Image: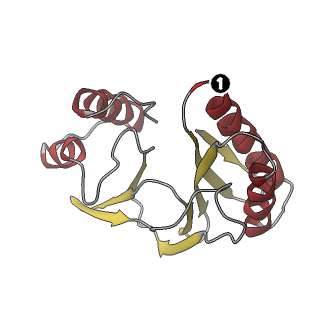
C-alpha cells in the first residue's frame, strides 16, 4: 500500500496485492507498487503502466498474480478516479452512507488482455474513501466492521479511523491473510 503526491495537485492511493503466499507474492506486490508509483509520478499514462506491469507478471516463471487498486484525486477539482484490476471492493462514505466501488475483473499476470476498470466520481469535502485488500473483505456488499464503524457515529481523525478499521477487519477475518 502507498500514498503519494505529484507536484500538480494530484494525490494517489495504491493497494497492490500479490496473490498467493510467501516470498514470491511479497516480491510481486512490492515490485508492482514501486513500478506504479514511479511511473505515475513521471507522468506515464496509468493504463500503459498497468499494461507494462501485466506483461512483466506474465513473463514470471511462478504463478503469482497481483491486484491493483489505484486511486487518483485532483485536489483542485475534487474529481477522483479509481482504476481496479482484480482488486477487492473499495468504499465511499458520504453523509453517513456507504457506497460500494467495485469491478469484477482479473488481476494482472493472469491473462494477456488487460481489463482494468475505471470508476470516476466527484468528491465532497467530507467524503472518506476506504480501500482494502481482499484479506479485509473478499465478499460483496459492505463488510460488517465498516458498517458498524460508520453507524457508531465516530468522528475520529483519519489516522485513528484507519487504525480502528484495520483492527476490526483483523478481528472479523474469516481466513488468515495479509490485510491492508
Circle 1 sits on which residue? 23
Count the numbered circles shown.
Answer: 1
- Residue projecting furthest to the right: 42
For the question of whether residue 127 can be seen, the reply is no
Q: Where on the picture, by quarter, is residue 178?
A: top left
Give the colour scheme shown: secondary structure
Q: What residue lies at 75% left-to-right and 38% top-to-bottom?
A: 31
Q: What residue lies at 33% left-to-right and 64% top-to-bottom?
A: 100
Comparing 69 with 4, the one in front is: 69
Q: Going by the image, does 28 lie left or right of 90?
A: right
| Residue 71 image point, x, y percent | 57, 58
Q: Quadrant of the N terminus?
A: top right
| Residue 157 image point, x, y percent | 36, 36
**Quick one: SS at disc 1?**
helix
| Residue 83 image point, x, y percent | 58, 65
Relative height, residue 9 to residue 17 (above, below): below
For the question of whether residue 161 can be seen, the reply is yes
| Residue 151 image point, x, y percent | 13, 49
Q: Where on the picture, by quarter, is residue 125?
A: bottom left
Amino acid at each position: 500500500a502507498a500514498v503519494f503526491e505529484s507536484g500538480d495537485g494530484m494525490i494517489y492511493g495504491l493497494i497492490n496485492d500479490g496473490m498467493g503466499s510467501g516470498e514470491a507474492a511479497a516480491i510481486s506486490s512490492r515490485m508492482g507498487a514501486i513500478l506504479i508509483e514511479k511511473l505515475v509520478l513521471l507522468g506515464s499514462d496509468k493504463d500503459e503502466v498497468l499494461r507494462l506491469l501485466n506483461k512483466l507478471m506474465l513473463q514470471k516463471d511462478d504463478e503469482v498474480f497481483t491486484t491493483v487498486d489505484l486511486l487518483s484525486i485532483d485536489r483542485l477539482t475534487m474529481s477522483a478516479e479509481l482504476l481496479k484490476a482484480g482488486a477487492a471492493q473499495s468504499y465511499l462514505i458520504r453523509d453517513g452512507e456507504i457506497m460500494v466501488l467495485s469491478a469484477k475483473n482479473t488481476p494482472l499476470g493472469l491473462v494477456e488482455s488487460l481489463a482494468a476498470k475505471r470508476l470516476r466520481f466527484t468528491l465532497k469535502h467530507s467524503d472518506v474513501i476506504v480501500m482494502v485488500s481482499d484479506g479485509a473483505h473478499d465478499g460483496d456488499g459492505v463488510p460488517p466492521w465498516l458498517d458498524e464503524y460508520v453507524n457508531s457515529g465516530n468522528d475520529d481523525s483519519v489516522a485513528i479511523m484507519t487504525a480502528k478499521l484495520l483492527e476490526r477487519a483483523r478481528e472479523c477475518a474469516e481466513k488468515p491473510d495479509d490485510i491492508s
